[in-house]
């Protein structure tokens, strides 16, 4: 049964278009004069800036060598293996005492290596570079490429590859790739081709090493063929994998293009081993699932709980990738986010500005507002604003404005500190950075006139539009300019007329693409009647209103000064009902984000009475409960007067 499965795998591989273009046979190494660093298409290659010389070698055919090997084994069936181990023992002891690549290569002069040791040599060379600094590693690799012994080892890897064991093939490939040898060189391509032929013989350990290796490699025909082979093998081999680390390697190797049932099979198998998860297992699970593009909530929930309980033991370099993977997977967990923010707030003094900003920007992408962290960082900025770069300042403004974080009595001092440093960068700012800064400040209702003067200069406007000559201007830039124009016109009436409007560039701002909640619409019509309701209104080409209710204005109320801007009758009361999706609020709270706050503020200044209805509350109510809730939101005065009337008419105790 298993043998037939392997035969099917070979047939499947060989039937692919990838296989036919680079099919491997042992005879391709016979009687050739080539450089191990030369590919069939690209000629002589360079590895890290050093040209590898052409080396002549002679290799017997696969059939001849196989016959010789069988004869040697038959001649001494009992003594060959022990003798081989005895001969290798001194070499292994010397190999472990080598602490840089050149030491390993020098050892080869004293102990000529057999084909069984090529993998050990390459692996030791790679391991010896792990503990070096970047500068030391660069220097040692340069010496390694210049050493004639490295050329010899790579040559031997090419000629002996087909005789290596599965583990040796996998580790040899991982070593040469991690040493920076070009993927197009003959040594790498030869190992890839031999592995293709033998991959069905790999055990779980060798497959894990291979998976870890190919996930870091660029896609080419050989790599793509191996990935496909790995996917075919995993269909039958997943049940026998009992290691979380191996499963994570497989997740990264199969990638986002693998079938969804294979992704779920890997995730389900990993979930079955949840009791064995260590903290590092939980941390790397996020990036492993992200590499597959699979949001598997049961597994992520388990890992989130594990991380939240051990957050104080996790270094920053692992916390940040976890949060970034959450954003990539569109996964949110309030317990996880809260534990990370509380831990960083409690140990705030040990984190640099860069680390804090990276976490805050990631939290903002996740729609999460870490209140204490924001307050602490604002205090640090007020005390030492000069420590921030322009990039830092733009990130700070983005986070504080989009999360709609109010510092209350310290808001003015905070903005003054930020503006002071920003002004020092003003002459050097690009037009895009200037637009970003003014846009974020406009959301905070704080825009200095001098900055607007600079933005509206023809030179800066031309730079913004120049990027759109060859292609359409990005929607984000259009939306920024359009919203900024509304902020100037509605929020800053004290500005000169020339600064209260952005020039009309005939932008087409994408309209709202969400359908109106018909159940809510029916409930509103049952309250105010059909004729009073107008659905799907787009105001100022950017603000979508689910429905507008037009009612006679109460006599005691005066008409809004901006009512004429929208063309409504002078004495009509217009109620704008806006359904707010969960993304309009900070995650896990009812705190509105800047986009919703700005929209409601501008609608009010345009003469509407905005009524905000959270979508999540609509979905959890019956029709009767929905009508009651909407009636309270649309007519709050009637509800309060009705309540007061009930209190007045209730019997009093004597």
Image: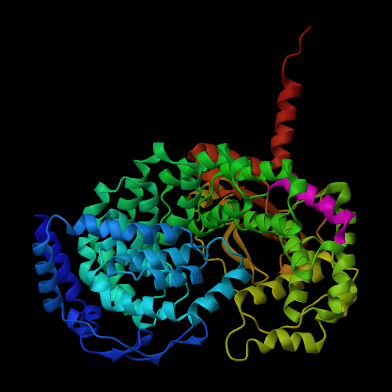
- The answer to whether residue 92 is magenta is no
Residue sticking out furthest to the top: 654
- Report x, y in % for residue 56: 31, 89
What residue is drawn where x is 46% and y is 41%? 302
The residue that appears at 12% across and 65% down in the rendered structure is 7
Nearer-the-camera pick, 195 or 284? 195
The percent position of residue 436, horizontal first and vertical second, equals: 73, 71
Residue at (81% x, 59% y) in the render: 560
Residues in magenta, as a range: 370-385
Q: Residue at x 85, y 53 (%)?
A: 411
Residue furthest to the front in view is 110
- Residue 384 painted magenta: yes
Q: Quadrant of residue 74?
A: bottom left
213 on left or right of 232: right
Residue 620 vertical placement versus 84 (above, below): above
Task: Classify residue 74 as left or right of residue 372.
Answer: left
């Amino acid at each position: 049964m298993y043998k037939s499965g392997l035969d099917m795998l070979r047939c499947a591989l060989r039937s692919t278009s990838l296989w036919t273009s680079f099919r491997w046979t042992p005879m391709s190494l016979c009687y050739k004069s080539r450089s191990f660093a030369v590919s069939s298409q690209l000629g002589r290659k360079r590895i890290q800036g050093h040209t590898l010389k052409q080396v002549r070698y002679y290799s017997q055919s696969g059939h001849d060598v196989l016959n010789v090997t069988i004869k040697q084994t038959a001649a001494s069936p009992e003594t060959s293996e022990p003798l081989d181990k005895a001969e290798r023992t001194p070499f292994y002891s010397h190999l472990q005492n080598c602490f840089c690549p050149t030491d390993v290569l020098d050892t080869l002069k004293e102990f000529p290596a057999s084909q069984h040791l090529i993998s050990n040599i390459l692996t030791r060379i790679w391991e010896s570079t792990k503990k070096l600094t970047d500068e030391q590693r660069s220097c040692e690799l340069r010496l390694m490429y210049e050493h004639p012994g490295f050329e010899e080892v790579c040559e031997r890897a090419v000629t002996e590859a087909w005789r290596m064991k599965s583990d040796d093939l996998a580790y040899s490939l991982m070593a040469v790739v991690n040493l920076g040898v070009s993927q197009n060189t003959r040594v790498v391509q030869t190992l890839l081709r031999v592995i293709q032929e033998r991959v069905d013989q790999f055990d779980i350990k060798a497959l894990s090493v291979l998976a870890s290796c190919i996930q870091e490699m660029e896609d080419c025909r050989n790599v793509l063929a191996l990935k496909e082979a790995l996917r075919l093998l995993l269909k039958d081999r997943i049940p026998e994998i009992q290691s979380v680390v191996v499963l994570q390697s497989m997740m990264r190797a199969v990638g986002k293009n693998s079938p969804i049932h294979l992704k779920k099979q890997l995730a389900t198998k990993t979930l079955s081993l949840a009791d064995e998860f260590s903290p590092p297992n939980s941390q790397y699970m996020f990036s492993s699932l992200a590499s597959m593009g699979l949001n598997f909530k049961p597994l992520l929930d388990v890992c989130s709980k594990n991380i939240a309980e051990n957050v104080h033991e996790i270094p920053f370099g692992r916390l940040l990738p976890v949060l970034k993977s959450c954003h990539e997977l569109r996964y949110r967990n309030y317990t996880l986010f809260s534990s990370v923010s509380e831990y960083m707030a409690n140990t705030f003094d040990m984190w640099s500005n860069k680390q804090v900003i990276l976490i805050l920007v990631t939290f903002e992408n996740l729609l999460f507002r870490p209140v204490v962290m924001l307050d602490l960082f604002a205090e640090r900025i007020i005390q030492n604003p000069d420590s921030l770069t322009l990039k830092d300042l733009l990130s700070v403004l983005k986070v504080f404005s989009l999360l709609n974080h109010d510092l209350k009595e310290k808001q003015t001092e905070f903005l003054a500190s930020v503006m002071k440093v920003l002004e020092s960068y003003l002459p050097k700012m690009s037009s895009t950075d200037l637009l970003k800064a003014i846009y974020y400040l406009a959301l905070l209702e704080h825009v200095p006139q001098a900055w607007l003067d600079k933005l509206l200069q023809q030179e800066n406007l031309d730079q913004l539009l120049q990027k759109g000559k060859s292609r359409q201007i990005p929607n984000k830039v259009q939306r920024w300019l359009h919203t900024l124009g509304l902020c100037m016109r509605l929020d800053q009436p004290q500005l000169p007329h020339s600064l209260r409007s952005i020039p009309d560039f005939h932008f087409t701002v994408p309209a709202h693409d969400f359908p109106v909640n018909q159940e809510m619409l029916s409930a509103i019509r049952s309250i105010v009647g059909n004729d009073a309701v107008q659905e799907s209104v787009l105001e100022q080409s950017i603000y979508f209103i689910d429905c507008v209710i037009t009612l006679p204005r109460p006599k005691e109320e005066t008409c809004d000064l901006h009512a004429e801007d929208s063309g409504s009758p002078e004495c009509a009361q217009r109620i704008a009902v806006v359904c707010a999706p969960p993304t309009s609020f900070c995650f896990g709270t009812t705190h509105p984000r800047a986009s919703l706050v700005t929209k409601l503020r501008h609608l009010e200044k345009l003469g509407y009475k905005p009524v905000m209805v959270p979508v999540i509350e609509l979905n959890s109510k019956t029709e009767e409960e929905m009508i009651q809730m909407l009636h309270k939101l649309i007519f709050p005065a009637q509800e309060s007067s009705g309540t007061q009337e009930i209190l007045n008419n209730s019997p009093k105790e004597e």
